Image (cartoon, helix red, strand yellow):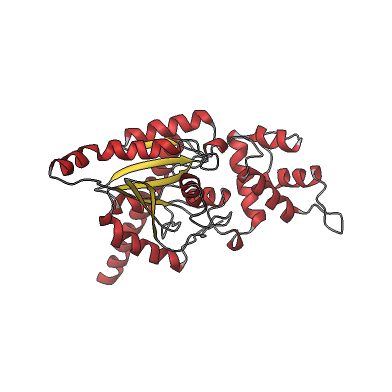
Amino acid sequence: MNIQWYPGHMTKTRRMMEETISLVDIVIELVDARIPYSSKNPDLDTLAKNKHRIILLNKCDLADDRATAIWTDYFEQQGFRVIQMNSLKGTGMNQVTDAARSLMQEKIEKLKARGRINVPIRSMIAGIPNVGKSTFINKYVGKAMTKTGDKPGVTRGKQWIKLKKDFELLDTPGILWPKFEDQEVGLKLAFTGSINDDILDAETLAVSFIDHLLMRNADAIRKRYQIAFDTAAEPHEVLRQIAEARSFKLKGGEPDLARTAKILLDEFRGGKLGRITLELPEDITEMLESKAEREASKATEDKVRKQKFKGKETK
């Protein structure tokens, strides 16, 4: 299943971020705690290379606690300030301003020594679609400052928001990047709802999701739907079992797999399958190594092909 989603408004958003990044001191990025690597925008590493960085591991209530602790250590070792957060309940909110003030303390003290008073901390908040940015801001401010919804792409324009007397936030629309480095990344973004469902085939996506869960979270499906299967089961057959367990049938009596697929994905996204993290740092290392091997193999093939072509030209 080849997944790519980069509508025109995201190109405009990236351009806007490039134009306004100089106005901020800190870049705060929300990532989905269930897919911390796959939901972290690699473009920000270039755009914000000279800025302080804070990563908010949002939706921690839906992710495995042990996995979240591992990811926290992983990002901290890379130099990020990391905060575990549940934007719906407001967990971790106060730590954001504390972290920002800590990062900016030295600069603020220097400015005050030069006579500057009431120096505001300016931050840009960024994240993929449907990661919970608007919910975070609304919870922080205490009123509906930004539109929220369960579909990616609700926020469409930049806006400055004053969260505290000394803390200003530049909100940006949810943005992905032009090309996913691996289709595993695209799949995980689709599993969690950050890719527009309208461009996806729900049944194919659900089968891929089941295939992923069979490797390490098979019990989540067994317990939720009260079905029995082993880890060698075919994902499509598991989807049929879920349909039968829920009595989802078409008029002819066949299992309604399309409806079942949608329900399965919705229930995962809503946390009804339990607290599940879909990736760990070790998985990413393996994925990147595999990618490097594929690229090296392709480069070798291209080189051989070019040499053969040159050999034919000289004859």
The answer to whether residue 64 of the structure is visible from this angle is: yes
13 shown above or below 271: below
> How many numbered marks, from 0 up?
0
In the image, 249: left or right of 29? right
Residue 224 on image: x %, y %: 71, 36
198 shown above or below 97: below
The answer to whether residue 315 of the structure is visible from this angle is: no
Q: Nearer the viewer, residue 196 or 270?
A: 270
243 shown above or below 309: above
Q: Quadrant of residue 96?
A: top left
Q: Quadrant of residue 288?
A: top left
Q: Residue at x 69, y 39 (%)?
A: 233
Q: Residue placed farthest to the right in the image? A: 252
In the image, 72: left or right of 225? left
In the image, 211: left or right of 300? right
196 shown above or below 107: below
Residue 163 on image: x %, y %: 40, 47
Residue 241 on image: x %, y %: 76, 43
Q: Quadrant of residue 254?
A: bottom right
Quarter of the image with the N terminus in it: bottom right
Q: Residue at x 27, y 66 (%)?
A: 310
Residue 193 on image: x %, y %: 57, 52
Quarter of the image with the C terminus in it: bottom left
Q: Nearer the viewer, residue 104 or 27?
A: 104
Q: Nearer the viewer, residue 308 or 238?
A: 238
